[in-house]
Image: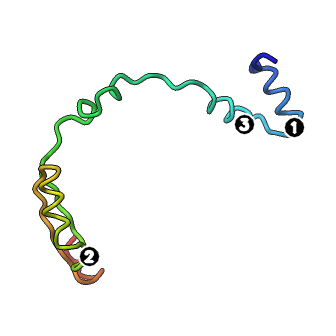
Amino acid sequence: MTGLDRREFVRRAAALGLSLPAASALLSACRPARHDPALDDPARALGPLERELAIYIWSDYVAPDTIPNFEKEFGFQVTMDFYDSNEEMLAKR
């Protein structure tokens, strides 16, 4: 059997009890995606990345060697700011 055309798909979907919006959603999901040239080079699509990362997190939530290992592997400078309770976090915002 060859592929279904849209008209035949909608007819069969209606026979199965699918609504027109449901059949439309299925058809649009099957449509091939358009090629985005920016996805060929994600770094170009994002633009220049800042090399500094600021983290605001609960104290004692990250292992002591995690941040130095991250900085070494990815070349980022990490600044960590800690809080001990949700109230303290909201007060700093």
The residue under label 1 is 16
Q: Quadrant of residue 64?
A: bottom left
Could you tell me which residue is drawn at 40 percent across and 24 percent down?
Answer: 36
Q: Is residue 56 left or right of residue 7?
A: left
Q: Is 15 placed left or right of 78 in the picture?
A: right
Label placed on residue 21: 3
Query: Eyeballing the image, is 28 above or below 66?
Result: above
Residue found 62% across the figure and 33% down from its top: 29
Q: Which residue is mark 2?
A: 61
Q: Quadrant of the C terminus?
A: bottom left
Q: Residues within 10 Å of mark 3 (few under 14, many from 20)?
A: few
Say which label, 1 or 3, has the lower sequence index: 1
User: 10 Å neighbourhood of mark 2: few (<14), some, or many (≥20)?
Assistant: few
Q: Residue at x 85, y 29 (%)?
A: 12
Of tags 2 and 1, the one toward the viewer is 2
Tag in front: 1 or 3? 1
Tell whether 31 sits left or right of 22: left
Percent across and percent down for residue 78 are: 13, 60
- Give residue 40's position: percent from left, percent from top: 33, 26
Residue shown at 18%/58% (left/top)?
70
Q: Quadrant of residue 20?
A: top right
Q: Who is closer to the viewer here, 59 or 68?
A: 68
Q: Tags 1 and 3 in contact by the CB under 8 Å rule?
A: no
Give the CA distance from mark 2 to mark 3. 47 Å
Relative placement, left or right, of 49 versus 38 is left
